[in-house]
C-alpha cells in the first residue's frame, strides 16, 4: 500500500489581541511521501483509491489552494466510510485548544447531516512544551494496536494534566487492555517512529502549532470558534465535492482527485510570520537593557535573553520548561534576564511580581519564581508568605519589609515602560540579543535565534574586543533604541464635503451650530452602538456648539437592519426618532414587525400611521437614498461621521472626536496647516499635538 503525504499549517485557537499566543506552538520536521491513499481499516472503509488510480482530467476543476495532505491505514480515523470531506488534524493531547477542537469534531461527525459525508483523520503532534504529550501519543497508538485508540484518545483529553507512564497504564487498565502487551509496546517505543513521522511531516508544510488541520487539503487559517463555523467550512467543501462528482468523479475518488491536483510543498513563509505595523520586527535587534534585573547564566554570556513575564499568565508558565532546557543546552553561552510585565486583567500578577522582587533582594528570586509558577491558582498574600517561609535561607522578616518597599513598584513600572517602548504588550515576550520572539515558543525557535546571535556576538567580540562581561552593553549601543512606529493617521481626513442635512433626524443646536456632525449608522452594527454612545457624550459636552444628524446606512450583511431603519423613519415621521433610535440599539434581537409595533406603542405613536409609514415604499426608498448619500460622501463602513464635511471612520474613542472638534473650533485643519507652514518658513516647528490613539477599524 502506498503512503499519503500530509502538509498542514498552523491554526491557532484564541486569540489575545495583544496577548502573545492564542494556541500552543512548536516546530517540527518533514519528508516527502509516496502516492496517496484515502481510507483505511480504521475507518471501516472499503478499498483505497490512490492518486495513481485517477487521472489528471479533473485537476482544473479543483478550486483554491490545496496541499497534498494524505494518509494511510497506519493513521487513526473515524467518521464516514466513503466521505465527501476529509479533515486531517495534527493534535497534541496536552493542548487545551486541541481538546476543545476535538469536542467540536466529535459533535460534527455525530450530526446526522454530516455523519455519512465527513471523515476525521488524527495525526500526532506532541509539542515540546507539553512534557508528557509524547507519552500520550505513544499510549494512544499502543491502545490502537488493541482496537482502543479512540477510547484512549478520549480519556487522555479528559485528563490532560495526568499523562505520565503511570497515568497511561492506569487508563489502559480501565480500558481492559492486555497490559503485558501494552507495557511491552511502550517499553519498546514501538510507535515513536510513527509519532516522529507525523511531526516531521508537519514541519515540511509549516506546522508550528496545534490544533492544525486541513479540510480536503485546504488549510484553514484559524480554528473555528463555534460548531457552526466548522460546519460552514465543511458545507463549502461538501458542495465542491458534489460538483466534482457531477463533473465525472466517483464518490470514492474525491479525495484522491483533490490530492492529485494539490501542491506537494509550501515555499512561502506563513503571512502571520511577517511583522505587523506597531509590532517588533523579528529581524531587528532592539537595545533592551538589563538594568540589574534577576538573571541566571553567566554575566559574560555571548547571548542575553530578556524575558517579559506575568506570574498569572498560563503561557508564561508553559515556557518555563523551555527556559530550563536552554539553561542546560547553553550553560556558558546564554544568560536569561527576567523583567516584570503583569497584565491588567490578572488581578494577582502585580502582587506576585512584588513577592518575587522582594525575594530577589536576598538573592532568592528564582526560588520564588518557581513556587509562583508552580502554584498559579494560589496567589493570595497568605500564599506568598507561605512560599517565602518555604525558601531555605530566606529571612522572612526582611522579605516582609522589602515587600512593602516602594522601590519594588517603581521597578515594575520601569519594566512595563521598557516593554511598551519596544512594542511588547503581551506575555511572555522575549528579546534574544535584542531579537524579538513572542509567546510560549518551543525550544527549537529559541535555539535557532540563539545560534544566530551567538555567531554575531563572537564576531563582535573578535572585532571590537570589549570586556566579556560588558559584551551585551556594548552590542546594544548599535541596536534599535525603540520600536519605530509610523504616526497614526489623523482622526478625520483633510477634505471638506458638501453634506446635506435636509429631512434628517437631528438633535443639538440645529439653527446655528459651530460643528455639524452627520452620522451614517446601522442599527445592527455593534460598532455603531459604540458610536451612538459617543455621540451622546458629544452632545452632552459640546451643548449648543454642535448639531448631530442621522443617516440610515444598514449594511447588507445585517439582514434585519433595513426593517429597523424603516421603523426609525416611521417614528421620525411622528417626532420620535431618537426615542426609537435608543430602543433599536438597546436590543438587536427584537427585529420582527411585532417588535417594532410594540416599540411604537411604548412611545405612544399612532399605530395606524406607524404601520402605514413603515410599509410605505417611499420609506424603503428613503433608506436607499441615505445609503447612496453616505457612499457619495466616501463612507465605506459603519459607523462613519462627517464632521463639518470631514470624514472620521469607525467607532473611535471620544478623545479622537474631541481632537477634531477642538481643531474645528480653532479654524479647522486649514488653520493648523497654515501655522505649520509659517513655522517652517521661520525655520522652526509648531508644538505638536498629543499623539492620538490609533483608530479602530470601522464596523463591517
Image (cartoon, rainbow, N blue to C red):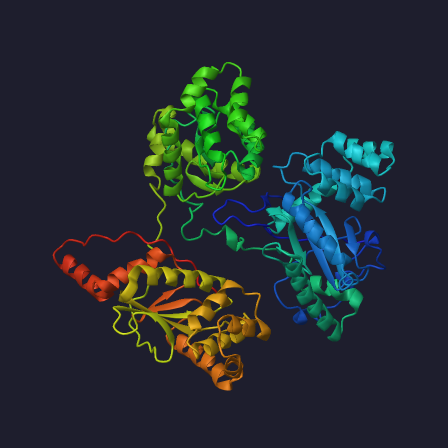
516 and 411: which is toward the camera: 516
Place of residue 638 in the rendered image (x, y in percent of width and height, measured from the top left): 45, 67
46 and 483: which is toward the camera: 483
Place of residue 654 in the rendered image (x, y in percent of width and height, measured from the top left): 36, 57
User: Which residue in the rendered view is the most extreme toward the bottom?
Assistant: 617
Res 290 seen here: no
- Which residue is at a point 53% across and 79% down the rendered structure image? 607
- Which residue is at a point 65% across and 62% down the rendered structure image? 233
- Which residue is at a point 73% across and 55% down the rendered structure image? 107
Place of residue 141 in the rendered image (x, y in percent of width and height, measured from the top left): 78, 42
- Which residue is at a point 55% across and 74% down the rendered structure image? 597
Horizontally, is 87 left or right of 577 in the view? Answer: right
Place of residue 415 in the rendered image (x, y in percent of width and height, measured from the top left): 39, 35
Horizontally, is 293 left or right of 140 in the view? Answer: left
Horizontally, is 330 left or right of 245 in the view? Answer: left
Instruction: Decide: is 498 above or below 72.
Output: below
Which quarter of the figure has residue 261? bottom right
42 and 386: which is toward the camera: 386
Horizontally, is 266 left or right of 164 in the view? Answer: left
Amino acid at each position: 500500500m502506498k503512503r499519503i503525504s500530509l502538509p498542514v499549517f498552523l491554526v491557532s485557537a484564541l486569540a489575545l489581541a495583544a496577548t502573545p499566543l492564542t494556541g500552543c506552538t512548536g516546530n517540527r520536521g518533514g519528508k516527502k511521501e509516496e502516492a496517496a491513499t484515502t481510507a483505511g481499516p480504521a475507518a471501516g472503509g472499503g478499498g483505497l483509491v490512490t492518486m495513481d488510480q485517477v487521472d489528471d482530467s479533473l485537476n482544473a476543476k479543483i478550486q483554491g489552494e490545496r496541499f497534498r495532505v494524505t494518509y494511510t491505514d497506519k493513521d487513526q480515523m473515524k467518521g464516514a466510510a466513503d466521505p465527501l470531506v476529509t479533515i486531517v488534524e495534527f493534535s497534541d493531547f496536552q493542548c487545551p485548544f486541541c481538546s476543545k477542537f476535538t469536542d467540536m469534531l466529535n459533535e460534527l461527525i455525530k450530526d446526522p447531516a454530516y455523519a455519512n459525508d465527513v471523515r476525521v483523520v488524527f495525526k500526532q503532534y506532541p509539542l515540546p512544551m507539553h512534557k508528557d504529550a509524547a507519552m500520550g501519543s505513544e499510549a494512544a497508538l499502543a491502545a490502537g494496536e488493541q482496537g482502543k485508540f479512540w477510547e484512549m484518545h478520549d480519556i487522555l483529553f479528559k485528563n490532560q494534566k495526568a499523562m505520565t507512564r503511570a497515568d497511561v497504564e492506569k487508563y489502559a487498565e480501565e480500558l481492559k487492555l492486555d497490559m503485558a502487551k501494552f507495557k511491552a509496546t511502550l517499553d519498546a517505543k514501538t510507535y515513536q517512529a510513527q509519532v516522529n513521522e507525523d511531526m516531521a511531516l508537519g514541519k515540511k508544510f509549516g506546522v508550528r502549532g496545534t490544533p492544525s488541520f486541513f479540510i480536503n487539503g485546504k488549510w484553514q487559517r484559524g480554528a473555528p470558534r463555534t460548531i457552526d463555523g466548522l460546519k460552514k467550512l465543511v458545507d463549502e467543501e461538501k458542495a465542491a465535492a458534489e460538483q466534482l462528482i457531477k463533473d465525472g468523479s466517483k464518490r470514492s475518488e474525491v479525495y484522491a482527485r483533490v490530492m492529485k491536483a494539490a501542491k506537494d510543498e509550501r515555499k512561502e513563509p506563513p503571512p502571520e510570520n511577517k511583522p505587523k505595523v506597531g509590532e517588533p520586527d523579528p529581524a531587528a535587534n532592539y537595545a533592551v537593557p538589563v538594568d540589574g534585573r534577576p538573571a541566571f547564566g553567566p554575566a559574560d554570556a555571548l547571548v542575553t535573553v530578556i524575558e517579559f513575564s506575568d506570574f498569572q499568565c498560563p503561557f508564561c508558565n508553559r515556557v518555563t520548561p523551555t527556559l530550563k532546557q536552554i539553561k542546560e543546552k547553553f550553560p556558558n553561552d546564554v544568560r536569561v534576564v527576567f523583567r516584570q510585565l503583569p497584565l491588567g486583567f490578572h488581578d494577582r500578577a502585580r502582587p506576585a511580581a512584588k513577592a518575587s522582587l522582594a525575594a530577589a533582594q536576598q538573592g532568592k528570586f528564582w526560588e520564588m519564581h518557581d513556587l509562583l509558577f508552580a502554584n498559579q491558582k494560589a496567589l493570595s498574600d497568605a500564599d506568598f508568605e507561605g512560599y517565602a517561609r518555604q525558601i531555605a535561607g530566606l529571612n522572612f522578616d526582611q522579605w516582609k519589609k522589602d515587600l512593602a518597599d516602594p522601590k519594588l513598584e517603581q521597578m515594575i513600572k520601569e519594566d512595563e515602560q521598557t516593554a511598551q517602548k519596544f512594542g511588547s504588550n503581551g506575555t511572555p515576550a522575549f528579546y534574544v540579543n535584542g531579537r524579538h520572539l513572542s509567546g510560549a515558543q518551543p525550544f527549537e525557535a529559541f535555539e535557532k535565534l540563539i545560534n544566530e546571535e551567538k555567531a554575531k556576538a563572537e564576531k563582535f567580540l573578535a572585532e571590537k574586543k570589549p570586556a566579556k562581561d560588558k559584551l551585551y552593553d556594548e552590542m546594544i549601543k548599535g541596536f534599535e533604541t525603540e520600536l519605530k512606529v509610523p504616526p497614526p493617521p489623523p482622526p478625520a481626513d483633510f477634505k471638506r464635503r458638501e453634506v446635506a442635512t435636509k429631512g434628517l433626524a437631528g438633535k443639538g443646536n440645529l439653527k446655528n451650530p459651530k460643528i455639524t456632525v452627520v452620522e451614517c449608522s446601522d442599527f445592527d452594527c455593534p460598532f455603531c452602538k459604540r458610536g451612538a454612545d459617543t455621540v451622546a457624550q458629544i452632545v452632552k459636552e459640546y451643548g449648543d456648539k454642535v448639531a448631530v444628524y442621522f443617516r440610515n446606512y444598514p449594511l447588507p450583511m445585517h439582514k434585519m437592519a433595513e426593517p429597523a431603519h424603516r421603523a426609525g423613519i416611521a417614528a421620525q415621521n411622528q417626532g420620535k426618532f431618537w426615542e426609537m433610535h435608543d430602543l433599536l440599539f438597546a436590543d438587536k434581537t427584537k427585529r420582527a414587525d411585532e417588535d417594532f409595533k410594540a416599540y411604537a406603542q411604548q412611545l405612544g405613536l399612532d399605530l395606524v400611521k406607524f404601520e402605514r409609514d413603515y410599509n410605505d415604499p417611499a420609506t424603503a426608498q428613503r433608506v436607499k437614498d441615505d445609503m447612496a448619500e453616505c457612499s457619495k460622501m466616501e463612507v465605506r463602513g459603519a459607523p462613519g461621521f462627517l464632521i463639518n464635511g470631514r470624514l472620521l471612520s469607525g467607532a473611535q474613542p471620544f478623545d479622537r472626536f474631541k481632537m477634531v472638534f477642538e481643531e474645528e473650533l480653532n479654524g479647522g485643519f486649514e488653520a493648523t496647516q497654515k501655522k505649520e507652514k509659517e513655522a517652517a518658513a521661520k525655520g522652526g516647528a509648531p508644538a505638536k499635538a498629543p499623539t492620538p490613539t490609533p483608530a479602530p477599524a470601522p464596523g463591517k
